[in-house]
């Protein structure tokens, strides 16, 4: 069965794909989203939305919903050295000079996706096809054709353009034959959602717990007492018995009572990889399909949202004849450079600090630098501005 042609098909109904689709739809285009899973993925994934993505969410009309659903982290990020008890807080007070929203929002990726999906499905000309797995791709100078297996059999989709936002194992990237160079880390991350009163033991809303054996990211993600704890374990340990080992991990790391409620967990591999290009003809890549990083610091989702920020206005302008196609090459070059030069190295350094600080001298040097930043507002401001360089310039005029 051949589906009616769309202006754009977005493959992947994660946050980046849905946000890109929403932007394209608001630009007046017919957009079809194709997703292999039967529904939004509710496993523990990214949770942090940094201050410099809020302009994008505001422009797309979802900022208030995200703000209301999420938990504002206003005080900063605390680094905790597990073995010594030292705490270093990098305050967010400097954000008051940089943004009208001087905070980070913590919100489960699934809940964020549900907000975007609701807005998308309310728009004419937008549709989402679940349980539909892409099996092939061909293109010419005029259109892209996708073959896919859906709930009622094989389909062919035709569109003027395709955006592949279907994750690190992207079927679209593989169909294009694009390389995905980089590294797969030799550890497994285990993301857990637990109910435990970390605040009673002095934890901030966002914490990096530094320890070479027991390091973790610990962040509160809603107002019901739900926290995300993400730790690492040896990849040689069987993934099937993650739950059997989990109580021993929490017994060593929980600061007080050992009573906790495990709500959800997800073990997964970590990568530092980028596609060789984010554009191949009429197909563009965004999010993890284009680049993947370990999640320490929240730079993976942030990078993907910033891909969408630049991609949807540029692609809409090209389709409407308001911009030449080479702006999409600029999208590819700019976003790839931002990932390789900023997101990937920073996430790798944070991962090393939190999970692999085995050298006491280097750890002390790292902590000395962090203490200096914590004590100096100018340095804290510069660190936030350096992180915000993950943003790349808009390629076409965009209405705020």
Image (cartoon, helix red, strand yellow):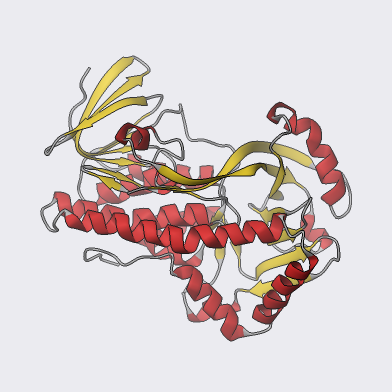
- Residue drawn at the location 44% of the way across and 45% of the way down: 181
Quarter assignment of residue 8: top left
Which quarter of the image is occupied by the C terminus?
bottom left
At 78% from the left and 51% from the top, the residue drawn is: 214
Query: Which quadrant of the view contains residue 195?
Result: top right
The answer, for residue 297, to whether it is visible in the render is: no
Q: Is residue 358 visible?
A: yes
**Image x and y of residue 237, in percent:** 74, 33
- At horizontal 41% and vertical 36% (from top left) the residue drawn is 170
Left/right placement of residue 150 relative to residue 350 reads left
Q: Residue furthest right?
A: 257
Residues 373 and 124: in front is 373
Can you tell which quarter of the image residue 45 is in?
A: top right
State the residue in front, 154 or 142. Answer: 142
Residue in the image at 49% along x and 52% along y:
301
- Residue 378 point in image, percent of width and height: 57, 85
115 versus 144 height, above or below? below
Q: Is residue 374 above or below residue 217?
A: below
**Spot occupied by residue 221 in the image (x, y as percentages of width and height):** 63, 52
Residue 213 location (% of width, % of height): 79, 50
Which quadrant does the N terminus fall into? top left
């Amino acid at each position: 069965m051949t589906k009616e042609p769309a202006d754009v098909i977005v493959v992947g109904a994660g946050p980046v794909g849905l946000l890109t689709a929403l932007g394209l739809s608001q630009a007046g285009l017919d957009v079809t989203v194709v997703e292999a899973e039967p529904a939004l993925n509710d496993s523990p994934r990214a949770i942090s939305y940094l201050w410099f993505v809020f302009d994008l969410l505001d422009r797309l009309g979802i900022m208030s919903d995200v703000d209301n659903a999420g938990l504002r982290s206003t005080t900063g990020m605390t680094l905790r050295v597990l073995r010594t008890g030292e705490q270093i807080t990098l305050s967010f007070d400097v954000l008051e000079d940089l943004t009208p929203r001087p905070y980070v929002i913590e919100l489960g990726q699934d809940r964020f996706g549900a907000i975007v999906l609701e807005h998308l499905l309310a728009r004419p000309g937008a549709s989402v096809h679940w349980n539909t797995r892409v099996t092939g791709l061909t293109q010419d100078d005029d259109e892209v054709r996708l073959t896919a297996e859906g709930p009622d059999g094989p389909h062919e989709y035709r569109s003027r353009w395709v955006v592949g936002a279907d994750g690190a194992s992207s079927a679209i990237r593989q169909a294009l034959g694009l390389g995905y160079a980089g590294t797969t880390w030799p550890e497994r991350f285990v993301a857990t959602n637990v109910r435990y009163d970390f605040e009673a033991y002095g934890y901030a809303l966002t914490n990096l717990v530094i320890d070479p054996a027991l390091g973790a990211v610990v962040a509160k993600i809603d107002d019901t007492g739900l926290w995300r704890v993400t730790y690492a374990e040896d990849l040689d340990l069987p993934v099937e018995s993650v739950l059997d080992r989990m109580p021993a991990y929490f017994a060593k790391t929980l600061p007080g009572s050992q009573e906790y409620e495990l709500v959800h967990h997800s073990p997964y591999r970590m990568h530092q990889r980028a596609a060789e290009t984010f554009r191949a003809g009429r197909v563009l890549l965004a999010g993890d399909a284009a680049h993947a990083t370990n999640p320490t610091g929240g730079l993976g989702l942030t990078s993907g949202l910033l891909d969408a920020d630049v991609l949807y206005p540029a692609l809409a302008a090209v389709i409407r004849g308001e911009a030449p196609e080479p702006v999409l090459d600029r999208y590819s070059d700019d976003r790839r450079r931002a990932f390789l030069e900023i997101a990937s190295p920073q996430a790798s350094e944070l991962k090393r600090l939190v999970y692999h600080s085995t050298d006491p001298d280097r750890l002390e040097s790292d902590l000395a630098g962090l203490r200096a930043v914590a004590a100096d507002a100018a340095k804290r401001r510069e660190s936030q501005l350096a992180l915000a360089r993950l943003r790349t310039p808009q390629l076409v005029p965009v209405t705020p």
